[in-house]
Image: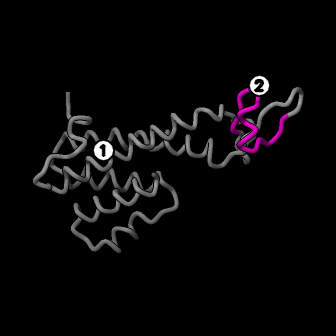
Amino acid sequence: MQGHIESVMVVTVHRLLEIPMDLARQMLGSTRVETNATLWRDTIRAKCEDGQIVELAELAFDEFACITRGRNDFVHAIHVALYGEHMGLVPFPHTLLLRGEPLAIRTRDPTKRRPSAEVHAVRDQVAELAQKVAHIDWEISKYPEPSPWRDKFAPR
């Protein structure tokens, strides 16, 4: 899903700056999501005249840090469970037999731990962000049809 979000961000920058796609890809080519999100948000601030879309882009930008942290908690982690007094790696079929809850432990900083079951919440946050970014691009594109996400992100 992160790749989808980043691809839509590239298209949005391409549309707003009226530059070739290759150039937009280069501009948002950092390996740091935060760097790309900053450039995306700043482009929308500078070029979009719709205040509601700018405000939504600000909200989406704020969500990127949470998404990155969540991704790191699970992608860059080992999933372990307690077997009595010991901790061990848990192959998938055996997770169903555990008495305790498996944990995601970051490989670079084992003090950062999170229940493995929270991966679903992180997935849902990323999906919500993907829809928000797609809605912003849809509105900027000026398609004649309303955004499929209009009701979800319309101002209240």
Mark nearest the camera among 2 and 1 is 2
Q: Which residues are magenta?
A: 87-104
Which quadrant: the C terminus? top left
Amino acid carrying label 2: it is Arg
Left or right: 101 with respect to 131? right
In which image quadrant can residue 126 be found? top left
Q: Which amino acid lies under the numbered mark 1 shown in the image of this protein?
A: Ala
Secondary structure, mark 1, is helix
Instruction: Kindly identify the residue that appears in the image at 69 percent across and 45 percent down.
Output: 77
Q: Where residue 79 sits: x, y (%)? A: 72, 41
Callout 2 touching callout 1 (CB < 8 Å): no
Q: Earlier in the sequence, mark 2 or mark 1?
A: 1
- What's the CA distance linking mark 2 and mark 1? 43 Å
Q: How is the image coloured?
A: one colour
Residue 73: say if magenta: no
| Residue lying at 42% horizontally and 39% vertically, measured from the top left | 63
Nearest the eye: 58 or 156: 156
- Residue 110 placed where, x, y %? 75, 40
**Percent x, y of residue 122:** 51, 38
Residue at the spot x=32%, y=43% of the render?
132
Residue identified by numbered label 1: 57
Q: From what the image shows, is residue 96 above or below residue 25?
A: above
Give the tally of numbered discs. 2
Q: Label 1 crowding class (10 Å Cα cut-off): few <14, some 14-19, many 20+?
A: many
- The vertical placement of 27 against 79, above or below, is below
The numbered dot on residue 111 is none
Front-lying residue, 36 or 4: 4
Q: Is residue 21 left or right of residue 148?
A: right
Could you say which disc has been placed on residue 99 in the image?
2
Label 2 element class: loop
